[in-house]
Image (cartoon, grey):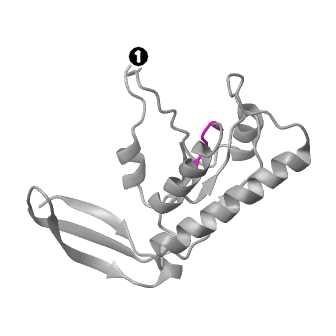
């Protein structure tokens, strides 16, 4: 009986209701199907992922998985403790171009059709200034906040439309 929102590769919105589950599989029925991507795209929460850049091919994997999970855009962060350093702006542009190729491949792999925007890496202050309060920003951390929760991912995704940064 659990209901979850889903999005088709063409951008159509669906509501899936779980009808049965087992150890290795689950069965869902499709409700409220709207296959018009133009109609659905205005009401879908657009998620922008703002991950810290990691070394080597690890960030390629982050990009790939974010695209396959349905991220709208990716804003790579240069952090004080990051081990990745760019010598020149052309190095940064080349790396961003590589991530865009990885994103295209991931989009083809998962059957998606909505391209993911990957911006040039930046410091968190600059990235947040560009974000300009378009929606909530969730900071994921392994420890629960001491002052109580002020927001949670599923609650923000349940709201129709808008933007969300993680």
- Residue at the image point whose x is 88% and y is 37% from the top: 87
In the depicted view, which residue is nearer to us: 123 or 44?
123
**SS category of the residue bearing label 1:** loop
Q: Is residue 25 above or below residue 122?
A: below
Q: Is residue 54 above or below residue 71?
A: above
Q: Position of residue 39 (x, y in %)?
A: 49, 79
Q: Main secondary structure of the magenta part?
A: loop
The image quarter containing residue 99 is bottom right
Tell me, yes or no, if residue 116 can be seen here: no
Q: Position of residue 162 (x, y in %)?
A: 53, 57
Tell me, yes or no, if residue 19 can be seen here: yes
Residue 148 shown left or right of residue 11 in the figure: left
Extent of the magenta region: 49-53
Point out the residue furthest to the front here: 56
**Quarter the N terminus occupies:** bottom left
Query: Dot 1 corresponds to which residue?
Result: 147
- Residue at the image point whose x is 54% and y is 57% from the top: 64
Residue 107 shown left or right of residue 19 in the figure: right
Residue 159 shown left or right of residue 120 in the figure: left
Q: Is residue 34 magenta?
A: no
């Amino acid at each position: 009986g659990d209901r979850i929102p889903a999005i088709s590769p063409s951008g159509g919105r669906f509501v899936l209701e779980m009808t049965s589950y087992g150890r290795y599989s689950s069965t869902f029925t499709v409700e409220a199907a709207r296959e018009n991507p133009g109609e659905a795209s205005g009401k879908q929460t657009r998620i922008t992922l703002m991950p810290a850049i990691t070394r080597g091919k690890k960030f390629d994997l982050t990009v790939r998985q974010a695209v396959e999970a349905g991220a709208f855009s990716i804003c790579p962060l240069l952090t004080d403790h990051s081990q990745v350093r760019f010598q020149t702006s052309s190095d940064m542009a080349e790396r961003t171009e590589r991530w865009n190729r990885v994103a295209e491949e991931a989009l083809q792999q998962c059957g998606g059709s909505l391209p993911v925007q990957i911006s040039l890496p930046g410091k968190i202050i600059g990235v947040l200034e560009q974000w300009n309060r378009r929606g909530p920003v969730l900071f994921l951390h392994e420890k629960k906040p001491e002052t109580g929760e002020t927001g949670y991912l599923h609650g923000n995704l349940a709201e129709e439309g808008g933007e969300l940064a993680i």
